[in-house]
Image (spheres, rainbow, N blue to C red):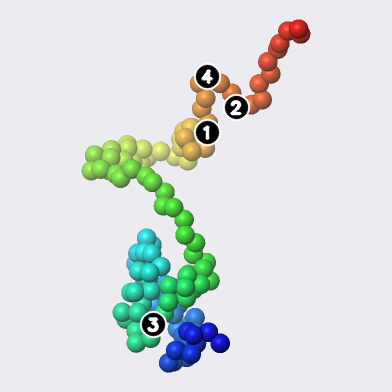
């Protein structure tokens, strides 16, 4: 039996008891670290959970740790331009929008193709 088990004074928390608190903490701050989640959870309850328990629970919830996508922040000018563009095209029909070349759906290459390119060489 491990030393941890010998020192334990109460029954371990079941995952059903941990899940609502951790879900709330995760939804509030998706960048929260596992130690931060454990500390937040432990502040609000009489029982305590370890970082390892938090990790298992987060994985069982279906969450995964991923690097955040880096995107530029929208300035007030960007927002104003987006709004004016939306107002200019408010009356467009579905057929009008079908004529637009969307940059996320199309590829544009000016100089080279990414297809297999053959090269002819002289025999020596």
Residue designated by label 2: 114
Confirm whether residue 95 shows in the render. Answer: no
Q: Secondary structure at mark 2?
A: loop
Quadrant the N terminus occupies? bottom right
The image shows residue 45 at horizontal and vertical percentages of: 34, 84
Of label 1 and label 3, which has the lower sequence position?
A: 3
Q: Secondary structure at mark 3?
A: loop
The image shows residue 115 at horizontal and vertical percentages of: 64, 26
Above or below: residue 2 compared with residue 93 = below
Confirm whether residue 7 shows in the render. Answer: yes
Between label 3 and label 2, give the one nearer the viewer: 3
In the picture, the disc for residue 119 is none
Left/right placement of residue 76 relative to residue 62 reads left
Mark 1 touching mark 3, by CB under 8 A? Answer: no
Between label 4 and label 1, give the one nearer the viewer: 4
Whole-number angstrom distance, CA of label 2 to CA of label 4: 10 Å
Instruction: Say which of 5 and 10 sits in front.
Output: 5
Residue designated by label 1: 106
Between label 3 and label 4, give the one nearer the viewer: 3
Residue designated by label 3: 48
């Amino acid at each position: 039996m491990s030393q941890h088990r010998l020192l334990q004074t109460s029954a371990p928390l079941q995952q059903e008891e941990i899940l609502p608190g951790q879900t709330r903490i995760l939804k509030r701050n998706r960048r929260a670290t596992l130690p931060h989640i454990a500390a937040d959870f432990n502040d609000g309850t009489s029982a305590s959970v370890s970082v390892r328990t938090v990790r298992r629970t987060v994985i069982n919830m279906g969450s995964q740790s991923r690097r955040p996508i880096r995107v530029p922040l929208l300035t007030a000018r960007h927002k104003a331009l987006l709004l004016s563009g939306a107002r200019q095209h408010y009356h467009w029909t579905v057929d009008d929008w079908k004529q637009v070349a969307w940059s996320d759906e199309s590829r544009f290459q000016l100089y080279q193709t990414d297809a297999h390119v053959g090269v002819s060489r002289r025999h020596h």
